[in-house]
Image (cartoon, grey):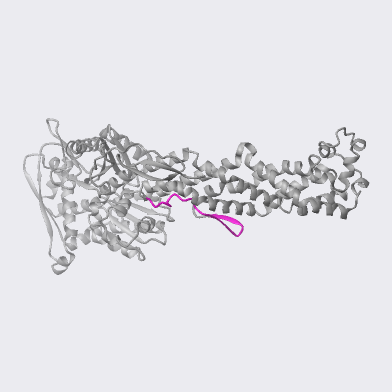
Amino acid sequence: MTAETYTSTTTPGTTTEGTTAAAITTAEESTIAVIGFDLGHGDTALTKVHVGTRAGGASLGDRNAPPEIIELGGDRKQLVTAVSVTDDGQVLIGEDALDHQGTRKYVAFKSPDLERAEVRMPLELFARRVVQDVRAARLGDAPKVRWVFGHPSGWTADQVADYRDLLAEVCAPDDVSLIPESRAALLYARDAGDIPEAGSLTSSALVASTLIVDIGSSTTDYTSVVDGTGRPVDHGNVVLGAHLIDKTLLALAIDRSPDAPRLRAELDRTPGAAEQLEISARKLKESFFATNPQRFQRNPKLRVRRTEEVFTADNDVIELLLAIGQDDMDRILSQPLPALANRTWPEAFRQDLAAALEHAGEDLELVLLTGGPSRMRFVAEIARELATDARVILGTEPEFAIARGLALAGRMDQRTRGFRADVERFLATDAVSGLVEERLPDLTGKMAETVAGGLTENHVIPAVRAWRDGDIATIDDMRDRIVAGVGADLNTTHNAALQKILSDWMAELRPELTQHTAVICRRWNLEPSALTLPEVTMSGGQLTVEVDTSAATDVLNNLSNLVNVVISGIIAATLFGSGAALLMATGPFAVLVAGAVIFAGVDKVKKGIMSQIGDKDVPRVLRRLGGEAGMVRKLREQSSRQESELAEALSSSLQSGDGGRLAREITASIEKQLTRVAADVELLIR
């Protein structure tokens, strides 16, 4: 089948020439602003990328540019996850919510427990206000917006669905999608370009041998790739969050305060105040780990500190000093925590990471740490201690890894949708079936030759001898033995001969098919061979295939069944049918034909004689007429011609039998393989 020239629309006003079995058309691309919305338990960050072009064809910047951080609440790159509502109904978020006095503050409310009003209400208020602010000030004239949120890997499918429903209401009428936060970290590691230590790793290596450890304020998530499939496996700990350290630090500061009893009473009365102090404790912790550790070594009394004010019910003010040195941090990190089954935070992290490393396998090359808390020095130390054969690296801004990865995921998914649509359109054409049907005669011819070759020597002569000696009662029984013998030959070799023929045939078809799919790959910036089918080969009499063996060998494993369905009728017609059949003029059969009217009462001797006497128990004296040597010689003399006729009839029947079943099965198998290959290729789209 000759490939046709086609024109495929890419950017409006431009065309790309290539070859494919049929024209692949795509709708004109429109501009989509993709927002990566990392709504965190402690802090929130957003990033933005664009996909597509304006309707007039004007470029909207670099569509492959890295995600741009959206500044929130002025010039802040991160927004404290906090919300409050003023007396006049104004919704305040971030630092504004914390600074406003006299209102109920909600802090650190991200949770899967959306049935609880104290979770659902502030989460909805916060997300809605952020969406409104971003729409008003940051999206320009982009006609479409897609919001991509992350969720902890440890959340259940039902929890994720409930979260998606809530966010869909908040972001309506825009598109909303959710992906695991650790999956976003994987895409960040691959595509963001701000991990200099990973520069020597190829993209495929980064995808195929990486463990992403994403530490957040409320959870720790892991993403690993198993067996190099490119399909991340996500899991996590929904309890192990860095806020547990913040709480312990705050508790230590309160214990040291001379106003501890009053503070505890006030914080019990006003939960929002405690959450606000916890944010201060987190900032102090970040300052501690941002300080050069050598300074603490040189001066053991060195402290990082900050002072916070707590307003009491009687309008008094209590000052709380938050101060921490190296000895304090050692004490905090060695404290058993009830939330972690009385393990310390480092102990729980060590156990979880060890399990994740075991899950990732022995070929792990890279451990990537993301999330703001991954800056805690002991995190990398534990990772390097456990992952002795892998590189442990930290991005330049790990606190923005998820937000960047979410935007990248949204952009990739938009392009993947287009790629998937192109593949589906291609499969909807007759390109694959046309290739199969064009090359099918070559396949069925070789298959038929394999089945028919040696039929006379291996099956006909032994069966005729057995019938002549009385071991087989009737001619029909002899026919059945020949058919069964051919089937047994196929089964005892596990169809190796037929499978080898088809695997060789597929090897010749693969490059022709690749010429047709290469245009799709070029359109989506993939290698032209990305959609090449996996190679099917023979090894030790068994078929092997590089990927997805079941899909690639479905039709191969059905071949013997298909051949056995048709050989019975073909052998019966060729050997035992009309007057031109092989056995009609051989040995005792010629005598039977000549005396058919007397012996069997047959009126039409030359038409269907064998079928009419097939169930008759011919006397042994008639079976032996002509002598065995002469009969065998006659069979051998005619074997070449008769086996050739049998092969021709079998080939024709394989092509047309059951409405072209063989062509349909091969086409379906190839399309199934292409779909599976395309699913793997999707992760390579950027």
The residue lying at 19 percent from left, 52 percent from top is: 282
In the image, the segment drawn in magenta is: 526-544
Q: Is residue 6 left or right of residue 93?
A: right
Q: Is residue 488 left or right of residue 27?
A: right
Magenta stretch: dominant SS?
A: loop
The residue lying at 53 percent from left, 51 percent from top is: 549
Q: How many marks?
A: 0
Q: Is residue 657 left or right of residue 601?
A: left
Relative image position of residue 115 (x, y in whole percent) = 30, 35
Q: Is residue 532 magenta?
A: yes
Depth order, front residue of 477/608: 608
Query: Can you name the residue that lies furthest to the left here?
Result: 316
Relative image position of residue 77 (x, y in whole percent) = 17, 48
Q: Quadrant of residue 666?
A: top right
Query: Can you name the residue that lies furthest to the top here?
Result: 88
Q: Is residue 27 magenta?
A: no
Is residue 105 visible in the rendered image? The answer is no
